[in-house]
Amino acid sequence: MGSKGKAPSSIDDAPWVEKYRPKTLDDVAAHKEIIDTIKRLVKEDRFPHVLFYGPPGTGKTSTILAVARQMYGSSLRSMVLELNASDDRGIGIVREQIVDFASTKTMFSNKFKLVILDECDAMTKDAQAALRRVIEKYTRNTRFCLICNYVNKIIPALQSRCTRFRFPPLADSYVRSRLQFVIDSERVNMAEGGLDAVVTLGAGDMRRTLNILQATHMSTDVVGEEAVYQCTGNPLPKDIEAIVQALFNEDFVDVFDRVQDMQLNKGLALTDIVQQLHPWVFRVNMPAAVRIKLVDALADTEHRLAFGTSERLQLGALVGAFSVAREGIVAAAK
Ligand SMILES: Nc1ncnc2c1ncn2[C@@H]1O[C@H](COP(=O)(O)OP(=O)(O)O)[C@@H](O)[C@H]1O
Ligand SMILES: [Mg+2]
C-alpha cells in the first residue's frame, strides 16, 4: 500500500487520527447499514466495485482499509493498490500504475485484487471515462473502490459501474463516544465545556475532531472550552456574544476599539469573527429589510477580507453596517 507521509518514530507521537483509525469493520462508528451491507457482500464473496462518497473524516478510507484487512490478512500489501487520483504527476501515471497492478498475476488466483482510488472528484471527465474503460478491462480479477467528496462530479457512466455508499457527517453521539474512548486511552485531562467545544468545532468530521483534541492536549494541561477555542484560533461563543451586544448597543468608536482589543488579546482574525456573526443576524429581532442589508454587508466584508483588504478598513465598514441596522431597528420601533 502506498503510505502517505513519514512513519511516526514511535507509536506515542503518532497522530491520533492514525492511532485510532478503526482496524475492523466493527470498529467503524455510525454507518451501520453501510457496514452491514459490506460485511454481507464480503462474506458472500460478492464484493462489487464501490463508490464511497461524503464529507471528509467520516470513515470512507477507514472502511475500505478494514475491508482489505479482512479479505487479505497478511497478504494485504501485494493485493491492494492505494492511489490518489489528484496525484500531481498526472492521471496518466495513475492509470499506468493501475494497469501494471491489475495485469500482474497473483499467487492467489481465486482472489481479486483491490484498487483504492481516492479523490476521484478531482479527475477530469475524460480521465474518468478512461478510468471506466480500465475498470471494465480488469473486472475479472480486480475490484475498484472509488472515493470522493462530491458524487455529482463523477460521470454517470462511472457511477453506474459501482455500488454507491453515502457517508454522512457523523452524528454527535458517535463523535462523543469515540472521543471519550480516546480521552480515556490517552488520559486526557478534560475540563468544563471542553468536550462540547471539540465536538462543535469538529463538525461531524472525525479527523478534524481528533486533531483538535490532540492539538489542544499537546498545548495545555487541561482541555477546557477556552483552551480548545484558543488553540484552534476560533472566537469563543461568549466573546462573539459580547461583540454582538456591543455592535447593536455601543457607539462606533467604542465598538471599534473593543473588537480590535479583543482581536489583539486573543489573536483572532476578523474573518473568523465575521463568520460567527452570521447566525446572530437571524437570532436578533429586526425588520426583514434591515436584516437583508446586514446579511449583505457581512457577506461583502467576508469577501473583501478573503481578498486581503485591510482588516482595519473592513472592521470600520462592519461596525458602520451595524450602526445603520441599529437605526433601522430603532426607526421601526417608533
Ligand atoms: N466512522 C468512523 N468511526 C471511527 N473513527 C472514524 C470514523 N470516521 C473517521 N474516523 C476517524 O477519522 C480518521 C479519518 O477517517 P477516514 O476514514 O480517513 O475519513 P475519510 O476517508 O472519510 O476522509 C480515522 O483515522 C479515524 O480516526
Ligand atoms: Mg479518505
Image (spheres, rainbow, N blue to C red):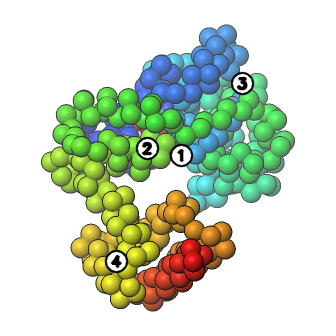
Q: CA distance from mark 2 to mark 1?
A: 8 Å
Helix, strand or loop status at disc 1: loop
Q: Nearer the viewer, mark 4 or mark 2?
A: 4
Residue labelled with disc 3: 48
Task: Identify which residue is drawn at 58% across, 45% down.
Answer: 55
Residue 240 coordinates in the image, percent (x, y):
38, 65
Residue 249 coordinates in the image, percent (x, y):
40, 76
Task: Identify which residue is drawn at 57% across, 27% down.
Answer: 31
Residue labelled with disc 4: 259
Residue labelled with disc 2: 207
**Badge 2: residue crowd in 10 Å (few <14, some 14–19, many ≥20):** some
Residue labelled with disc 1: 56
User: Which tag, 2 or 1, sits closer to the chain's start?
Assistant: 1
Q: Quadrant of residue 289?
A: bottom right
Q: Disc 4, disc 2: CB below 8 Å?
A: no
Q: Nearer the viewer, mark 4 or mark 1?
A: 4
User: Which tag, 4 or 3, sits closer to the chain's start?
Assistant: 3
Task: Identify which residue is drawn at 65% across, 19% down.
Answer: 37
Q: Nearer the viewer, mark 4 or mark 3?
A: 4
Per the rendering, the mark at residue 234 is: none
Say whether residue 97 is left or right of residue 10.
right
**Badge 3: residue crowd in 10 Å (few <14, some 14–19, many ≥20):** some
Residue 187 visible within the image:
yes
Q: CA distance from mark 2 to mark 3?
A: 27 Å
Q: Is residue 105 above or below residue 244?
A: above
Q: Is the distance from the Cβ of mark 2 to the nearest ligand 1 atom less than 8 Å?
A: yes
**Badge 1: residue crowd in 10 Å (few <14, some 14–19, many ≥20):** some
Q: Is the distance from the Cβ of mark 1 to the nearest ligand 1 atom less than 8 Å?
A: yes
Q: CA distance from mark 4 to mark 2?
A: 32 Å
Residue 77 visible within the image:
no
Residue kind at label 1, given as amino acid type:
Pro
